[in-house]
Amino acid sequence: MKKIFIIAGEASGDYLGGMLMNDVHRLSNEEIEFSGIGGQYMEKAGLNELFSIGQLAIIGIFELVGKIFHVKKLIDRTVAKIQEYKPDLVISIDSSGFTHRVDKKIKKLMPGTPIVHYVAPPVWAWRKWRAKSLPKFLDKLLVLLPFEAELFLKHGLETVFVGHPIATDPDFHRPPEKEIQKFKGQDKIVVLLPGSRPSEINMHLPILAKVAEKMQHHYENVRFVIPTPESMLDRVCATTDNWDCRTLPVSDKSQKILAYYAADLAIAVSGSVTLELARTGTPFVTIYKTSAITHMLVKLLIQIKYVCLVNILAARSIVPELLQQDCTAENIFNHVIALEAGPKADIQKKAFEEIIKSITVDDPNAAAREILKIFDLGRK
């Protein structure tokens, strides 16, 4: 039996890891065991968990400083566990601030163990020099966006564009209309996506509470659905229970997708959830706010015009981006009203179709097949 140690550091990586594990299990000619770090999706796919993904839910330079010793302990603990486990392969997913530190140590300590990284670090956005360093400790890189492969291939790293699972995940197919209408009822559904990390939720939920209050006065029978990772559900519930409006926090994937299709619109923190909304054709406004120190440093380093993945892939502004000082309840509310009042929602929906095509590959199991090539175990 082959053994794989797999590491995901946040909710989006957990989703990708869960999909990858399920595909590998389904396509492999032999039994494969997965151990490592993940969340709800990877656990359901059979992960033997080292520790909860929630312990890595950190974002921002300022936020990291206060937990730097905690993170170092987790890195050392992870490396020790990998040495003890003696896997045939290590797979790290996204969260390069954590996973690449583990990868580098493992490459020195266990040079014969192949290391695959899934999801490219966004060198096209900032810190381009990182592309040169990856071949020193990675054996293969699987990328989700169509323009990423050439950035790393020229530095000698085997890199494969495998498409984004959100584009082909059958769970994101439109549910039966009866289910959508039953969920919606007579309500206007607004999906609020405050982020997947504690720092994001703490920053954005108070702002969204004010937006919800404004929307409740503007619309009749409005209900706010708040998808969140299972690890953050209690935190979100504790906060939104005090809101003076109807809220429904959900962590179940099927409920989240049903809410997308039932929704009139969404307000989403920038991240992979914006591709989920594009897949389901849900019009949205994207927001983001972080600490002043993190924002100042990132602003000096960032080299792209947009932060929302939808806008980046389209190379134009399709979705409003309300960032930092523009991320206020008044601004968000005004953009929501404008999104509904004019043709902007239909323009977004049409653009979403092309964006999803751009991250789709012919083989929806491409990532799993690249893993199985290492062992020569894949079924045709």
Image: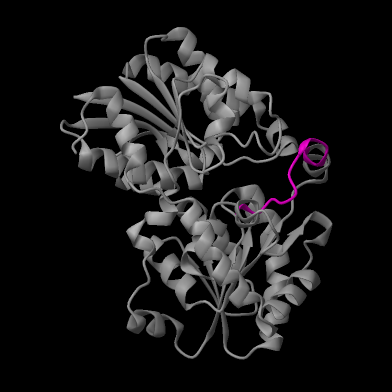
Q: Where is residue 306 in the image (x, y as percent from the top left)?
A: 71, 51
Residue extending furthest left? 29
Q: Quadrant of residue 327?
A: bottom right
> For the point 79% across and 44% down, which residue is it?
295
Left or right: residue 52 versus residue 170 is right
Q: In which quarter of the image is residue 214?
A: bottom right
> For the point 69% across and 29% down, which residue is it?
128
Q: Where is residue 329 in the image (x, y as percent from the top left)?
A: 77, 70
> For the point 61% across and 25% down, which residue is it?
131
Left or right: residue 314 versus residue 376 is right
- The boundaries of the magenta stretch are 298-309
Left or right: residue 336 versus residue 102 is right
Which corner quadrant holds the C terminus?
top left
Q: Where is residue 159 in the image (x, y as percent from the top left)?
A: 47, 29
The question of residue 377 being in magenta is answered with: no
Left or right: residue 370 versus residue 378 is right
Which corner quadrant holds the N terminus?
top left
Q: Position of residue 139 (x, y in %)?
A: 44, 20
For this rendering, which residue is in front, 147 or 330? 147
For this rendering, which residue is in front, 3 or 358? 358
The question of residue 307 being in magenta is answered with: yes
